[in-house]
Image: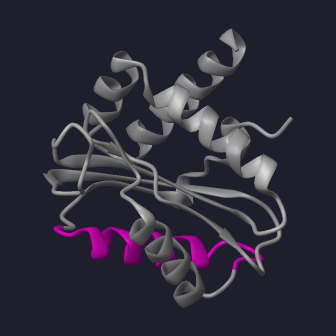
Amino acid sequence: MLTLTKLITSSHIVCRSDIASKKRVLEQFSTMLENAEHKPDSDLIFNGLLQREKIGSTAIGQGVAIPHARIESLQKPTVGVITLAKPIEYDAPDHKPVDIFFALLVPSDAPEKHLELLRQIAKFLSEPDTITKIRHSKTKKALYNTLLMGTVMHEEND
């Protein structure tokens, strides 16, 4: 089974960014995830994420959003994480600004995998303790370690 632990890499993490808009968050994910091996170009990623946001906000509350898309030329799922120094407006259901973003990209022919990974991310981020630890991570290395430890412990309890 594919798990979050296997998808989180330090090269796909940005900690305490100064990004100030939804569009810029999606652009940052597009650029960051384009640079991974066998990934489509940033325009394709950006358009996929943007189209999904047009359907409805991917914010889930508590200052968290999970932008996601199925991408035609993608070979395998990938995850990116961005935290912000200052939360931004993101049309969240609880009307709170967002400062924690988990982006998920999956191949377009893998809808079941897409839903399973979204479920894993949402469940992982539903723990208030997890969100607090992520917010208190001040460096990329600390954030990476927090994510890795949290996903490992979460997967062991699943």
The magenta stretch spans residue 29: yes
Q: Position of residue 16 (x, y in %)?
A: 25, 52
Residue 3, quarter of the rendered image: top right
Lateral position of residue 103 relative to residue 151, left or right: left
The magenta stretch spans residue 86: no
Residue located at (25% from left, 31% from top): 136
Q: How is the image coloured?
A: one colour
Magenta extent: 20-39
Lateral position of residue 30 relative to residue 60, left or right: right
Residue 44, quarter of the rendered image: bottom right
Work out whether 17 lies above or below 113.
below
Residue 133, quarter of the rendered image: top left
Residue located at (61% from left, 47% from top): 8
Lateral position of residue 46 relative to residue 7, left or right: left
Lateral position of residue 5 relative to residue 48, left or right: right
Q: Position of residue 124 (x, y in %)?
A: 52, 27
Q: Position of residue 140 (x, y in %)?
A: 39, 48
> In which quadrant of the rendered image does the C terminus lie?
top right
> In which quadrant of the rendered image does the N terminus lie?
top right
Residue located at (42% from left, 19% from top): 127
Q: Main secondary structure of the magenta part?
A: helix
Between 135 and 102, the one nearer to me in the picture: 102
Q: Position of residue 57 (x, y in %)?
A: 36, 57
